[in-house]
Image (cartoon, rainbow, N blue to C red):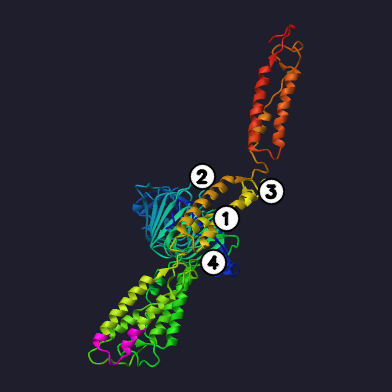
Amino acid sequence: MKNKALSTFMATALTATLVLPVAPVNAASSDSSVNQSIQIGERLAATKTKVPAGDAVTITNITKDKVRTSNGQYNISDSLKSLFKTANSTALTNAQATIVVKKGEITSVTSLTLKKAGTNKKTVYFDGGDAKIEGSLTVDADYVKVENVAIEDELIVTSRVKKSFSLDKVTIGDGITFKPLTARKINWLNVSLNDVKSATLNVERTKVDVSSNQTISTINVVDKVAAFEVSSNVDKLIIDVDKDFSLYGEGKIEQITVSGGAKVALDSGHIVTKVQVDDSKASVTLPVANKTELNKLLTSPPYVPVSVYGNDVLSTEKWTTQTDRNAFEAAVTNAKAVANNASASQEQVNNAVTQYKTALANYQAVQKNGTKYGYGNGDKTSLQNLINSVQYVTTSWDGYNLSNTTPWTTPTERSAMESAVSSAQAVVNNYYATQNDISNAIYNLNNAITTYKNAQRNRTAGYGTDKTSLQALINSVQYVTTSWDGYNLSYNTPWTTPTERSAMESAVSSAQAVVNNYYATQNDISNAINNLNNAITNYKNAQRNSTNGYYGDKTSLQALINSVQYVTTSWDGYNLSYNTLWTTPTERSAMESAVSSAQAVVNNYYATQNDISNAVYNLNSAITTYKNAQRNGINNGYYWQ
């Protein structure tokens, strides 16, 4: 399962992000999803405006038969005694409720808000005793567990629930809504659902971790949610978020619909049947399909001999015609193509499994027993079984034309195997073959099979080298915007010059050439990895953020210019009152010149950070000299230093 503590898109270093929609991800076919979202929004809006019937009260105390509230004391109807039992006194402390009262007796609860919080060591329990709340239940406190209650409308989890919340044997009519939480640091909220019957989860806050022992019908993840974890089976997961989003957890999800988002990472531990992207601007990292069952089916397809009439096949063996064999082999070939396709969706894998099983059933249905019988004491069953067990692999002179990890032998090695099989089959077909002939044929065929299997090798992109790490490093490269000066870019947009981008692209191209080179050695691959890592480091170091057109940050320099304060000028201070600060016009002129030079650097669009640093240093020096030159005027006509 993907580690939720890691950055959302570190996975892009391993798998290229796929921008959808593509079939079956079809934005044009999303009317039902849009309508569903509209209906969800309308239902939520209607829920928010619904005013529960009855009197609003605050519960202050509970006895065996009575409830004391801010509006007075009431008896409890039989249907609600399990709700207001004394065991719930702690959970109902200062709870807010809307109640319907008839003849001094509470007959209905149309809303209830739990305000009493527990701790990580002591949970607050609210056990409804199978009673019904004819409205909504709001949980407004942390470490609360709600049990054995039916909620007619929705269950609302407020932003005050920050760490833990549990439900056990609860039925909810309109779903569970997790209200947004606005905070600088948001921790994960752990939510446990045990035997909960609810049609929908509405997730409006980020970092909600839901585990459930029941399949969840629909989960709507909306607004500013950046991360969500679910460990359960889910029928529909609808993602309509404002920015980036990461999915975590495990279980089976029948369909994920991405209605909105920027970078949407779905590469969690879930098995996902179908992904539909309605937002063409969303960049979606797809989940990895589970191919365990498909690969197991393809390990050893149960072929039987091919014959025209079956008279060359023993009566103890099955056979089919070549046409029937070809039909099954076509299904095996198609299934292998899906198994070898790293981009295959879970839906494609599931379809391949179904089609393989159907083809196998058809293949087995047409199989017949042979009509050939052995002679004397010679039992050819073992020999025929050994012949049937032979599985050929693809032939190639060098494996270069094959997909990665495809097993192959040379045509010469294949021919030797076929010759051994032909010789063994001749013994089977020889009516007069003795047991000694059969034993020798089994011995020879076993030797040939061993030799053939030892000759098999996998296509691994050349000479047994492993280029996986190099290809993954190439896929991890992320380019930024190019600009000559960053002036045309929005604030803080990362960019490099076209020359720096070109150097990075050249390094990637060189690395890809090594991947594509069938004859590349492991040393070539290692060197390519080192070179590409160096290029990536240089490229990242060259990246800078747009600062509205300036190469450097001139804020400090401009602030220093603005801090300069001039004093009165005089040649001797004789005309100035006592304690009036002054300098000579020459000293004032030197200060003004230094300020002018610094302002020129601020106004210079092409000024570098080094230019700015020098200007700050020079201006500070000029300010120090100017301040040291200042002296006080005197009123007696004498010049004082």
Q: Residue shown at 56%/47% (left/top)?
A: 538
Residue occupied by mark 2: 184
Bounds of the magenta span?
A: 422-437
How packed mark 4 is, by other alpha carbons closer than 10 Å (few <14, some 14-19, many 20 or more), is: many
Residue type at mark 4 is Gln
> Label for residue 488?
3
Judged by depth in the image, the label closer to the viewer, 1 or 3, is: 3
Q: Does the image show residue 52?
A: yes
Residue 169 image point, x, y percent? 38, 61
> Closer to the N terminus: mark 1 or mark 2?
2
Q: CA distance from mark 1 to mark 2?
A: 18 Å
Residue occupied by mark 4: 276
Residue occupied by mark 1: 242
Q: Toward the viewer: 370 or 429?
A: 429
Q: Does the image show residue 136?
A: no
Q: CA distance from mark 4 to mark 2?
A: 33 Å
Q: Is residue 25 left or right of residue 612?
A: left
> Closer to the N terminus: mark 4 or mark 2?
2
Q: CA distance from mark 1 to mark 3?
A: 26 Å
Judged by depth in the image, the label closer to the viewer, 4 or 2, is: 4
> Closer to the N terminus: mark 4 or mark 1?
1
Per the image, is 426 magenta? yes
Residue type at mark 2 is Arg
Contact? badges 1 and 3 (CB < 8 Å): no
